[in-house]
Image (cartoon, rainbow, N blue to C red):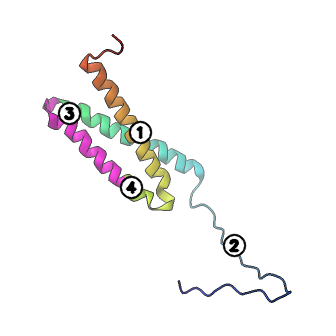
C-alpha cells in the first residue's frame, strides 16, 4: 500500500519501463505431481481404511461417524491449503481423494446392502 506510484510518461516521450518480477518456480513440476498423487491416495486410504477399521464397532459410531469425522478434518485441511497459492495443488488432490473415498464407500455400501438396480 505504501509503494510509490509508477512514473507517469512525459507528453510525447516514451513510456516508462516497469520491470517484471519473474521468479523461478519453487520446485520442479514433477515433484508437485508426485505430491498430489500421494496426497490423493493417502486421503482416500484414510477415509476408506477408517471405515473398514472401525467396522468392528458394529454401530453407527464406527461405520459412519468415524469416516465422517476424518472427512471433515480433511475438508478443513483442504480449505486452509487452498488459501496458499503454492499449496493449491495439494488442496485439489485432497478434494479428489475425498471424492474417490466417498465413491468407494458408496459402492461398498451398495454391494453389502443387497440393493438391485432395475429389478
Identify the residue shown where x is 38% and y is 59%. Answer: 80
Q: Is residue 111 left or right of residue 54?
A: right
Do residues under tags 2 and 3 come within 8 Å of each other at their CB atoms?
no
Residues under labels 3 and 4: Cα distance? 25 Å
- Read off the residue under disc 4: 79
Residues under labels 1 and 4: Cα distance? 18 Å
Give the quadrant of residue 61: top left
The mark nearer the N terminus, 2 or 4, is 2
- Read off the residue under disc 3: 63
Looking at the rendered structure, the secondary structure element under dot 3 is helix
- Read off the residue under disc 1: 41
The mark nearer the N terminus, 1 or 2, is 2
- Read off the residue under disc 2: 20
The mark nearer the N terminus, 3 or 4, is 3
Looking at the rendered structure, the secondary structure element under dot 4 is helix
In the displayed image of the protein, which residue is found farthest to the top? 119
Identify the residue shown where x is 39% and y is 55%. Answer: 79
- Above or below, 35 against 54 in this view is below
Amino acid at each position: 500500500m505504501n509503494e510509490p506510484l509508477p512514473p507517469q510518461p512525459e507528453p510525447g516521450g516514451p513510456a516508462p519501463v516497469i520491470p517484471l518480477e519473474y521468479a523461478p518456480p519453487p520446485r520442479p513440476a514433477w515433484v508437485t505431481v508426485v505430491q498430489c498423487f500421494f496426497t490423493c491416495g493417502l486421503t482416500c486410504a484414510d477415509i476408506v481404511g477408517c471405515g473398514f477399521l472401525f467396522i468392528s464397532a458394529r454401530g453407527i459410531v464406527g461405520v459412519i461417524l468415524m469416516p465422517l469425522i476424518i472427512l471433515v478434518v480433511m475438508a478443513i485441511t483442504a480449505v486452509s491449503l487452498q488459501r496458499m497459492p503454492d499449496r493449491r495443488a495439494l488442496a485439489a488432490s485432497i478434494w479428489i481423494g475425498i471424492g474417490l473415498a466417498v465413491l468407494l464407500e458408496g459402492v461398498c455400501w451398495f454391494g453389502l446392502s443387497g440393493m438391485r438396480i432395475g429389478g
